[in-house]
Amino acid sequence: MITFLSLLLTGLSTGAIYALVALGIVLLFKAAEVVNFAHGSLLLLGAYVTARTWEAVGFPTAVALGVLVGALAAVIVERLLANPMRDAAPVALAIMTIGVDIVIATELNRRMGPDIVVVGHPWGGTAARLGDVAVPANRLIALLVAGALIVAFLVAFKLTDWGVAMRAAAEDRETAALLGVRLSRVTTLSWILAGALAVVAGIFLAGSPTPGLSPAVGVIALRALPAAILGGLDSTTGALVGGLVVGVAESLAAGYQDQLSFLGRGFGDVVPYVVMIAVLLVRPAGLFGTREVGRV
Amino acid sequence: MYRRILLGLGVVLLLVLPYYVGQFWLRLGFSVAAAGIGAIGLTILTGTAGQLSLAHAFFLGVGAVTYCALAGTDADLVSLGWPPLVAALAGVLLAGLAGLAFSPVAARLRHIYLGIASIGLVVIGQHVLNTAAPLTGGFNGRLTPGIVSDAKVSIGGVPFGAYEKQWYVGFAFLALAALLARNLVRGRVGRAFVLLRDSEPAASSVGIAVQRYKALAFVVSSMYAGLAGVLYAVAIGSVAPSSFALDVSVLYLVMVVIGGLGSVAGAVAGAAAVTALPVLLQEYAGYLPFLAEPGSGGVTASHAARFVFGVAVIAVVLTRSGALHRFRPSALGSRS
């Protein structure tokens, strides 16, 4: 039971991190119909900046710097590349982001080499105890921070002018524009938010129990894509549910590896994708996604 | 007319080259032929039928592993010792079957959803290949049996070894693959694919069975990938599960995008560019002062090649021109 509870807690915290990344992916899809394959690279870029600067400027400032760089990189991609081709088919936009991903990932790979770069979390690798259940402090803090960010995001999405404009634009771009919504501003802001959220997630992903930042963290972050898809690409609720489902499923599969040994070692890493394909078989637009009308 | 003359000259050039060039170029040419076949398969699926897929690496893996297990003579691993060409054919068929098995998912998903679901196939495939160690050799991989015998024969006073013979096998397969693809794309099936890409409701209303044709595109493309996988395995000499990671799928996408989506000749040109660039940069790194040694932290040949690929993809998608081959205006599909 204790094993189960600690696995559940680990899964929920991992899931909350995935949800942050998936939320960004959904946001971009709603705002600009972009499926951003470069999201993992943006995450890695921001976390890398934090990892390289914390010794000089201290952890809080380094986090701020990392988030800033992540958001800035997202805006550059939006202004320079995504915006000029905003009327292209979603598949074309997705292929463009794959190009961006290749460039950023290559540069980061080159800089990191085979090293693992330590992100200097002040809480380091200490374990937190809740009764008999022990989890890395990093994961617990991640759960709290991600929860707070998600609540803040949802409140903003419901109440602020940006949130209303965003939802209006996602509903019907042309009508929203006619009613005075500045589409370009809404889109830019969405990219900023998506980039910033990804970097926060990246900083936690590179902490305990992960030894530090390496290109492998980008591979882990990629699991937010199945999370976003299984929840439904155009649903913020879907991103949250998808993130948690993927996180918990992965944690349980890894924890009960011995009982699942017939599925092979390291099955936990594959679970997000298995769950995604299973869900898509039943619901091709994800759990909460808008079903496309028109049968063929 | 000019095209025919050029084509004829190209064929003659390919036929006589083994008489003049060394092993390095022969091996590179064989790799290009292998990648070209895979790229043709992907351009049919993504370019002609409009289905974004990143699963190509998985089907390459199926073809390669099938070939190694059937033709192999390795005593520690599953090895049946079949004739190489029969094993290669079996690899193609099994890759097609794998595509068929995935087609219930592939045929239901649209555009971008398929793109992401297909990543899942690669990740799951990696896991399966790693787990099926008796078949694949696990993490360490296994040696690929040669597709031609090593025995030297002398033709016209020039000794022909494995690399020379391999060259002809590779380009014969490539020519066959390109011819089949051209006929497929120009014929009834190809037109159905194009309509499917441009509008599913329209395709459905003129009597095209949308799900079946999507599945068909997927199966055809995975069979091409299977053959490419067999030849790729032969080209690199040994294969491990990590030879078929997501990165390979991305490179295939790069090939068909810079070649111009939907163009068979463009796919081959793209495959040549993507395969040859890192090898050539590495070979001539000594003459290129901006390239650093691997491990020095600088920009190595493989980094430089990847930067070029990334920028090229962005540039092609942004401008939709400047491709190696004519780039059709509707190549990336339309909004629906």
Image (cartoon, coloured by chain):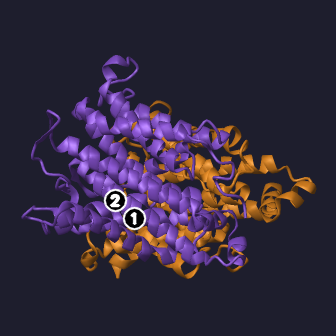
Work out how far the residue at label 1 is from the one at label 2, CA to CA, in angstroms: 6 Å
Asked whether the residues under marks 1 and 2 belong to the same chain, the reply is: yes
Q: Residue at left 48%, top 36%?
A: B6
Q: Which amino acid, by three-letter code, is at mark 1?
A: Met
**Residues at marks 1 and 2 touching, judged by CB atoms closer than 8 Å:** yes
Question: Chain A is shown in which shade?
Answer: orange
Mark 1 falls within which chain?
Answer: B
Q: Quadrant of residue B133?
A: bottom left
Q: Quadrant of residue B206?
A: bottom right
Residue closest to the eye, B253 or A275: B253
Residue closest to the eye, B44 or B136: B44
Q: Residue at left 79%, top 47%?
A: A184
The answer to whether one can see residue B23 in this image is yes
- Mark 2 lies on residue: B227
Residue A277 at what x, y percent from top left? Answer: 48, 74
Mark 2 falls within which chain?
Answer: B
